[in-house]
Image (cartoon, helix red, strand yellow):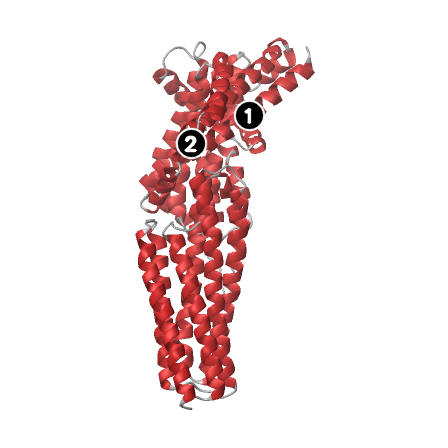
Amino acid sequence: MDWKLVIFQTVGGLGLFLMGMKIMSEGMQKAAGDRLRKILKVLTTNRFVGVFVGFLITAIIQSSSATSVMAIGFVNATLMTVQQAIGVELGAAVGTTVTGWIVTMDISAYAMPIIGIGVFIRFFSKSKTWQYMSEIMFGFGILFLGMSSMKDGFAPLKNSEQFISLFKSIDGHTYSSVILGVFVGTITTAVVQSSSAVVGIVIALASQGLINFDGSLAIVMGSNIGTTITGILASIGGSVNAKRAALAQTLFKTAGVILMLTVFYPFKNLVEMITPGLSSINLTVHIAMGHTLFNVINLVVFLPLVGPLAKLVNSIFPDKAKKDDDLPENFISIDYNMIETPSMAIMESEKELLVMSEYVINSMNLLRQMPVKEQDKAVEICDIILKNEDRIDKYQLYITQFLLSLSSRALTLKDANIVGSYIGLAHNLEKVADYVENISAIIDKMRRKQIDFSNNAVEIINRILDENISYFSESMEFFKSDVKTAAYTEKALTKSIRLKKMVKDAKIEHFDRIREKVCQGGAAIHFIDILNNLDAMSSENYNIAQVVSGKKY
C-alpha cells in the first residue's frame, strides 16, 4: 500500500472540501447581501424565529460552528439575549445537516465541469449576481472534488487489516463500541472544528465500505459535541453572557447525545424505517437522515426547555458588578469572529456606532447644563465629559480597526461602501465629541478665571447648541431606522444652512456689543471660540446626515 498516496489524497481532499465550503459560503453570503442582514434583524422577536434564522443562516454559510460563534458574539454585544442565542444554536444544529444531504448527491464526476463553468462565468460575466452565483458553483465543484479525493484516498484502506480491525471496534454492535464512536466523533470534530467536514469524512469512509451504519451514526452523534469547542473558544475573554451562551450550547448538545445513547438502537431502527432503501445499499443517505433526525429530535426536546436552561447557565455564571467608567474592551476581543460573515459584522459595527453616539449625545446634553451651573457642578460635568471623550476615542479606535479588517474580506460593492461610510461616521462622531470637549474646556477656564457671559450670550450659545443636539439626534434616529434615503440629505442641508446663519448672526451681534462696550474683553474672545466650535460641530452634523442617508461614502 502506498501510504504517501493515501495521506496526500485524504488530507488534500479534506482541504479541498473545507475550501469548497468556504468559497460556496462566501458566494451565498454575497448573493444574499442585504436580505441576510434583514433576516438577522428579526432575531429579536422570539425563540421560534431564532430557530428558523439559525437554521437558515447555517444552511447559507454551511457551518453551525460559525453560526454559534456569531450568536455568542451577538450576546456579548447585547444584540441578542441568552435565550434567543439558545434558539439560534438549536436551529443551527439542524441547519448544519444540509451539508450532509449535499454530500450524498453523487455528482463527483461532474465536479470539474461545474468548476469550469463557474470560472468561465466569473471571468466573462459583468453582472454581480452572476459573479456571485459563479463563486457558489466553483465552491460546490471544489467541495465534490474534495469528496472524490477523500474517497480515492480511503479506497486502499479496504485491503488493510489494521484499519479494518480499527473500524470494527466502532461498528456499533455493542454499547461500548457506540460510546467509542461518539468519542471519536467528538475528538475529530474538536480538532477539525467542523462537524460538516466530519460528516463528509464519515460518508467517504462509508462509501468505501470501511464503516457500517451503526458506527457512522455514533461518530456523527459525537460530532455534535465536538463542534461546541469553537463556541467555547469564542467565549474566552468575552462577557458573562457570552460564556452563558457557550455553556448552554455545550449542555444541550451533550445532554442530547446522552439521551440518544440510551435509545440508540431504537433510534437507529427509526432512521432505517423512514429512509428509503436498505442501509447496506443506500448508506450515505441513511447517515444524512440520521444526522438530521438526531438534531430535529434535539430541537423538539430542548426548545420548550430554553427558559430553564437559560436560568441554569445564569446561575452558573452570575452577573458581575460593572463600574461606571468601564471601557468597551470586549468589543475588540470578540467581534473579529464575525468578520467571516460580513452581514453580521456590519450589524455589529452599526450597534457599536449607536452606543458610541449615545456617549456623544450624553456629553452634548451635559454641556447644555454647564454655563448656568455653579463652579463645583461645572467642574464635575467637565470631568464626566472628559471621561466620555476617552470612551468615544476608544470606540472610534476599535470600530475603525474592526472595519479595516472587514474591508480586506471579500465584500459586495454595496457592503464595501457601507464599511467605508461607517469608518467615516466613527470619525465624524469622534469630531463632534471633540468640539463638545473643547467648549467644556473653554467654559471651565472661564469659571476658574471668574469670567462670565451675559445672559444674552448664554441664551445664544444654548440656542445654537440645542439646534446641534436636535440635528445630531435626528440623524442617529434615522441611522437606527436603517432606512436610507437621499431625501434626508436635503432636509439636513436646510438645517446646516440655518445653523451656519445662526452662528454668523451671533458673531455680527457680538461685534456690535463689543463696539458698544457691553461685553467684557475676556468673555468676548471665549464667546467667539465657542461659536467657532459650534460652527464646526454643525459641519460634522451635516457629514453625519450624509452618511446615514446613504449619500456619502
What amino acid is at disc 2? Lys
Q: Viewer-proximal residue, 241 or 71?
A: 71
Q: Which residue is mark 2?
A: 128
Does the rendering let one see residue 317? no
Gap in Å between the C-alphas at discs 2 and 1? 48 Å
Q: Is residue 187 left or right of residue 304?
A: right
Label 2, residues with CA under 10 Å away: few <14, some 14-19, many ≥20: some
The dot on residue 279 is none
Residue 123 picture location, percent across and down: 49, 25
Q: Is residue 448 visible?
A: yes
Q: On residue 180, which mark appears?
A: 1
Q: Earlier in the sequence, mark 2 or mark 1?
A: 2
Q: Is residue 106 above or below residue 11?
A: above
Picture coordinates of residue 368 (x, y %)?
39, 75
Using a 10 Å C-alpha cutoff, classify the residue at mark 1 as few (fewer than 14 neighbours), some (14 to 19) or many (20 or more).
many
Screen quadrant of the N terminus:
top right
